[in-house]
Image (cartoon, grey):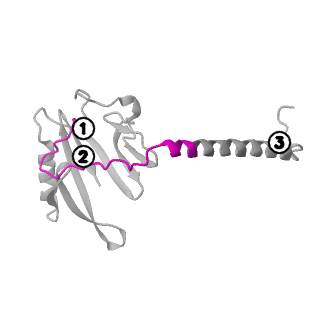
Amino acid sequence: MRNIMGLFGFGKKKRKSEEALKAAEENDKAEQETVEADEGADTEAPEAVELPEPSDEYVGRGDERGPWDVNDENVPDYDEYLDMGSYYLPFLQGIELRVKANRATQQVLGTTITYGSSSVEIEAFAAPKTLGLWDDVRADLIDANRAAKETEGVFGTELELPVVVKGGRKVTTRIVGIDGPRWMLRGIF
């Protein structure tokens, strides 16, 4: 008798209407509490965040902005982050996350994060003890594509690269590289 399927649902309408009435009352109560809380709250606008000026170096890395190395001081609590293996990503509402992994080893190679109409592809690379892997990578990219140009941005020296997409339309892609101790993080916007 465990696999009985109810076809007619006698008594469900009454139960559903009681549940709907109870839910509506709870919703009204929550709305009233929100209105009362809003009336007592300050009406000041949130503080504007001051963006860093473009420069040839990424000055804020590891201080007030990421990416951080696990050995940096003031590292955020990674319990609030998603562990991608070689790096952590903050949990954000409303993002789409795609993971690029090696099929054989299941090792994460990179991620693409999309928020609204913006996307960034992130990959981490091992680097030699001496810093400056991004300088070499950037030079190789410029040699491979003469239309690429260097610009100063908030992540240091960035590359702008024209790319032709479907339909023959040309868009500009931004490539950033951030050197850390024994690693480089590359972002493609």
**Residue at position x 42%, y 46% from top?**
97
Query: Residue type at mark 3?
Result: Arg
* Quadrant of the image containing the C terminus: bottom left
Q: Secondary structure at mark 3?
A: helix
Using a 10 Å C-alpha cutoff, classify the residue at mark 2 as few (fewer than 14 neighbours), some (14 to 19) or many (20 or more): many
Q: CA distance from mark 2 to mark 1?
A: 19 Å
Nearer the N terminus, badge 2 or badge 1? Answer: 1
The tag earlier along the polypeptide, 2 or 3, is 3
Residue under pointer 1: 64
Secondary-structure class at tag 1: loop
Query: How far is the residue under mark 2 from the one under mark 3?
Result: 56 Å
Which quadrant, please, contains the N terminus? top right
Q: Nearer the viewer, mark 2 or mark 1?
A: 1
Is 144 part of what is drawn in magenta? Answer: no
Taken as a whole, is the magenta stretch helix, strand or loop? Answer: loop
**Residue occupied by mark 3:** 15
Q: CA distance from mark 3 to mark 1?
A: 54 Å
Q: Secondary structure at mark 2?
A: strand
Q: Residue at x 40, y 41 (%)?
A: 103
Circle 1 residues within 10 Å: few <14, some 14–19, many ≥20? few
Of 12 and 39, nearer the camera is 39
Magenta stretch in the rendered image? 35-63
Q: Tell me residue 128's x, y (percent).
A: 14, 34
Label 3 CA crowd tier, 10 Å (few <14, some 14–19, many 20+): few
- Residue underneath mark 2: 186
